[in-house]
Amino acid sequence: MNQLLLPLLLLLVVAVPLIMGTRKQKKQQAAQQELQNSIAPGDRVMTTSGLYGTVADSSGDTTIDIEIAPGVVTTWLRQAVREKVEPTVETPETGETPEPETAGVTSQEATPASSEAPAQESISAGETQSSGAQVAPPLEHGKK
């Protein structure tokens, strides 16, 4: 009985991860196949090369047409579609800049260092940044 225990244990150690990996791969393939079959005109998609576009025509069995810019339609293989993405909604600018979050930061820590003061003054004087990024207060290394 002891002679059969070691080979059986080795077989289990090798076979179980192999079977579990195969099942995971089959599930991923089924999900990808379902995605490719569900592509319809008007869907926003991303290709495997990272190109975003809107599906213009999906009547072909193996190819789809993707509009990547207004009036620019390209033909792609269905397998090149990586995922559907939600369309980005651009909000109109209200002219107000959001206040930076300073929760847990004292007023002395929130004020910039003297070398950064000119840049901060121009922003706080009413100019808005085009990217909408906010400047974080400097980190205090060495203080405990």
Image: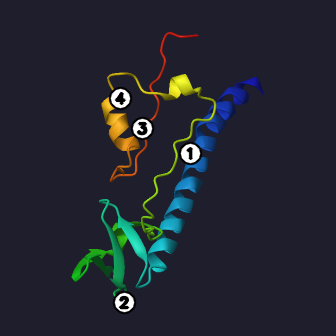
Please tell me how crowded label 4 is: few (under 14), some (14-19), or many (20+) other residues with Cα within 10 Å.
few
Please tell me how crowded label 3 is: few (under 14), some (14-19), or many (20+) other residues with Cα within 10 Å.
few
- Is 2 rendered above or below residue 28? above
The residue that mark 1 highlights is 18
The residue that mark 2 highlights is 59
Q: Amino acid at mark 2?
A: Ser
Choose the circle earlier in sequence order: 4 or 2. 2
- For the point 42% across and 38% down, which residue is it? 135
Q: Position of residue 113 (x, y in %)?
A: 39, 22
Seen from the viewer's position, the closer of residues 113 and 142 is 113
Q: Position of residue 93 (x, y in %)?
A: 42, 64
Of the two numbered discs 3 and 4 in the rendering, the one whose residue sits closer to the viewer: 4
The residue that mark 4 highlights is 117
Of the two numbered discs 1 and 2 in the rendering, the one whose residue sits closer to the viewer: 2
Choose the circle earlier in sequence order: 1 or 2. 1
Choose the circle earlier in sequence order: 1 or 3. 1
Q: Amino acid at mark 1?
A: Leu
Q: Is residue 14 left or right of residue 76?
A: right
Of the two numbered discs 1 and 3 in the rendering, the one whose residue sits closer to the viewer: 3
Q: Is residue 110 left or right of residue 123?
A: right
The residue that mark 3 highlights is 135
Quadrant for residue 15, please give it.
top right
- For the point 43% across and 43% down, which residue is it? 134
Where does the C terminus fall, quadrant-wise?
Answer: top right
- For the point 63% across and 31% down, which residue is it? 10
- Is 13 rendered above or below residue 83? above
